Amino acid sequence: MLRDQYTELPLPELREAGAEIDWERISPVELAVIWGNHRALEKLLKHPQLRLTSHSKLLNAVISRLGEQPLDDFCDHQRCFQLLLESDRVDINEADKAGLVPLSYAVKYRNTKGAQELLRQGAYIGARSAFGDLPIQEMDPKVLEEHFDSCITTNGEKPGDQSFEIIINYKNLMRRQREPGQSDKRSIGHPHQLEDEMTPIAYIADSKELRYLLQHPLISCFLLLKWHRLSVIFYLKVELYSLFTASIITHTLLKFHESDHTGLTALFGLFSWIGIVYLMIREVIQLAMSPLLYFRSIPNLMEVALIVLSILTCMEASYDKETQRLLAVFTILLVSVEYCLLVGSLPVLSTSTHMLMLRAVSSSFIKSFALYSIFVLTFSLCFYILFGKPQVDSSSPKDSTPEPAKEGEDDGHFNTFSVPIEALIKTIVMLTGEFDAGDIKFDSVYTYLIFLLFVFFMTIVLFNLLNGLAVSDTQAIKAQAELNGAIVRTNLLTRYEQVL
């Protein structure tokens, strides 16, 4: 009967073991947990010769049976659960072969009271399983919020007293440094092991259901402490890139304007090469850390292109001058965009909010304009057919009057829609209200009708629609400016902590 009782347990270890179980290797303390014998378990946990192996997942075993009613006075799994939590020999973050910790099992079995008790005892919420899942992924946000509230206490003094203190406990955001119940051999070096403390907060920032918890005092204070420790890296990065930006732009201007200050040009060229070496070292480190994910990031590809263009701009090239100018132009553009993105990642409310607004408005405009570009292309073809008629030469005095307009011949082609690509560009410009209707030749009532349709549907309706979408996006971002700043700070700290 004991064999049947044991094999019914929904534990990963038993599933992997199958029907044949070596009952001789099961310790008495494990049997006490299986049966829920809290009296035997209490005596065994206090026994000085008790040694728990790495395979003794006692908490994981008892959590799966917390919902069962006690059979009699000595069979109570809830009491066993409390004894295991109170024992200093049991690791509250013990993981099975699948990487699942007791908190993961409590959330999996929808045992809210068990999850709350594990959180109160300091269970780490950032323990990843073998599949990369966290214990808080399926947890009710209200449960997590209530526990965060309980982590903020006072010293009992009145708020007006000078001795009044607010005590914040970060026990669930940092893994315990000591693993109880293990031998000294396995514990060597563990207190000095670096832990990634930003994993659970990074998941909270990515989750729409949990994102609001970033504004909780527990998380915001934790991020503030982290920022004070790691902000020096960010500001050093900004200073180095600012020096590179100023150097390469100045060197490019002096070089292509053939300045007489050759020494100054050479000095800024030297600074530019130092900045290029710095960028190369930084990208090599990022590539070595995550080679598979490196080329999936658009900013990384932009930085690689910036390094290549900077080298081609600073070196003595043998190609023609026009090609050098084009490379210099694209280099300055990429440098400016990268500098804007870097400054925009500063976790200050005004800076991060403006950068998020720029990204949101740009993304919304591109998506909307991509759909309505069909009408832009249609109207540009209509204007090309109606107004792009070839000019007929005539010897009459009436036709020979526009002779002085030859000086602006290119501008005349642009305004008369005589070239298809220029007609498309002219139509896009007209969306902003720059019509130049005086230069358009209206030959019939149909030309007036097509032009008025374009003015009404494209310039008035479509352009105002795009503006309205942009305004709604900016208002939504401004409404959660503090939350956006916390998200930016979380992402920045997560990247830096992964590097460290």
Image: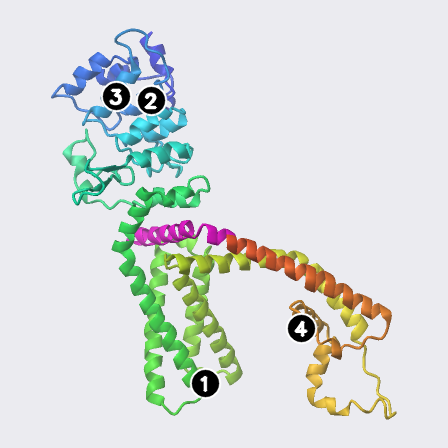
Q: Can residue 138 be seen in this view?
A: yes
**As shown in the figure, which amino acid type bears the numbered disc 2?**
Ile
User: Mark 1 — residue?
Assistant: 256
User: Mark 2 — residue?
Assistant: 63
**As shown in the figure, which amino acid type bears the numbered disc 3?**
Gln
**First along the sequence among labels 1 and 3:** 3
**As shown in the figure, which amino acid type bears the numbered disc 1?**
Phe
User: Mark 3 — residue?
Assistant: 82
Q: Nearer the viewer, mark 3 or mark 4?
A: 4
> Gap in Å between the C-alphas at discs 2 and 3?
11 Å
**First along the sequence among labels 3 and 4:** 3
Local packing at callout 1 (Cα closer than 10 Å; few below 14, some 14-19, many 20+) is few
| Residue interval drawn in magenta | 476-500
Label 2: state its secondary structure: helix
> Gap in Å between the C-alphas at discs 4 and 1?
34 Å
Identify whether 176 is placed above or below 232.
Answer: above
> Gap in Å between the C-alphas at discs 2 and 1?
73 Å
Identify whether 379 is placed above or below 95.
Answer: below
